Image (cartoon, helix red, strand yellow):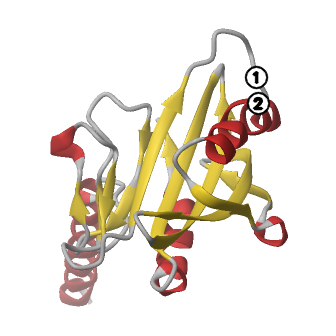
Amino acid sequence: MKKSLTRIFTVLLLLTLALTAIACSDDGIPDDMQNVAIDNANFDLFVPKSWISQKESGISGARVSNEDISNVTVTVYLPDRPLTVDEYWNGFCLPSYQNGVLKDFSLLAEQCGDTVLGGKNAKTYVFIYTLDGKAYEVMQIIAQKDDQLYTLTYTAESTNYSTHLETVESIRQNFRFR
């Protein structure tokens, strides 16, 4: 009896140690992903490990590969006065896209709507444009935290856009504010 109690105790002790080791090694990064947010960012941006990080360039983001330049970035805007996401989109983003270098700009209203980013209410905007004769499709997810506006942007050539939507959804779901 004493021997079996010792064995049970030993097994329980080993299980406890194993679970402790697993819990301590958890760095909060989802499996098979890397954090590509720049060091001083107020957020974590997790993308697949296979993607090429842009952190070294001072950009929170990554691209799929050298052959497929589909990419995800996060930018932060600190307005000089408080703005809602709608005010930011309609007052700053939309006019610059319609009147800027984005040729043939078209908002895909049926793909736009409410979502969540990092636990904050957000809006999704999807649009297409051409640049240097190539068609691109873009999804921007904009959320407000404190007085700052955070924009997660997914950009891809139109022919590749749908290829990475599932991955981009995983990126959105794993995004978190620090």
Dot 2 and dot 1 residues touching (CB under 8 Å)? yes
* Type of amino acid at the residue the image marks with label 2: Gly
Q: Position of residue 133 (x, y in %)?
A: 44, 70
The span from disc 2 to disc 1 (Cα, nearest Å) is 10 Å
Q: Is the N terminus in the top left, top right, bottom left or bottom right quadrant?
A: bottom left
Question: Where is mark 2, residue-wise?
Answer: 91
- State the residue in front, 61 or 119: 61
Percent of width and height locating residue 167: 47, 76
Residue that label 1 marks = 83
Count of numbered labels shown in the rendering: 2
Residue drawn at x 55%, y 53% as measured from the top left: 102
Compare marks 2 and 1 and give the one earlier in the sequence. Answer: 1
Q: Is residue 20 above or below residue 86?
A: below
Helix, strand or loop for disc 1:
loop
* Residue shown at the point (22%, 65%) measured from the top left: 17
Please, what is the three-letter code of the amino acid marked with disc 1?
A: Leu
Residue 73 coordinates in the image, percent (x, y): 42, 51
* Image quadrant where residue 105 sits: bottom right
Seen from this angle, which residue lies furthest top? 80
Residue, x 26% and y 65% (percent of image)?
22
Q: Label 1: how many residues lie within 10 Å, few (<14), some (14-19) or many (20+)?
A: some
Task: From the viewer's side, name the closer residue of 177 and 102.
Answer: 102
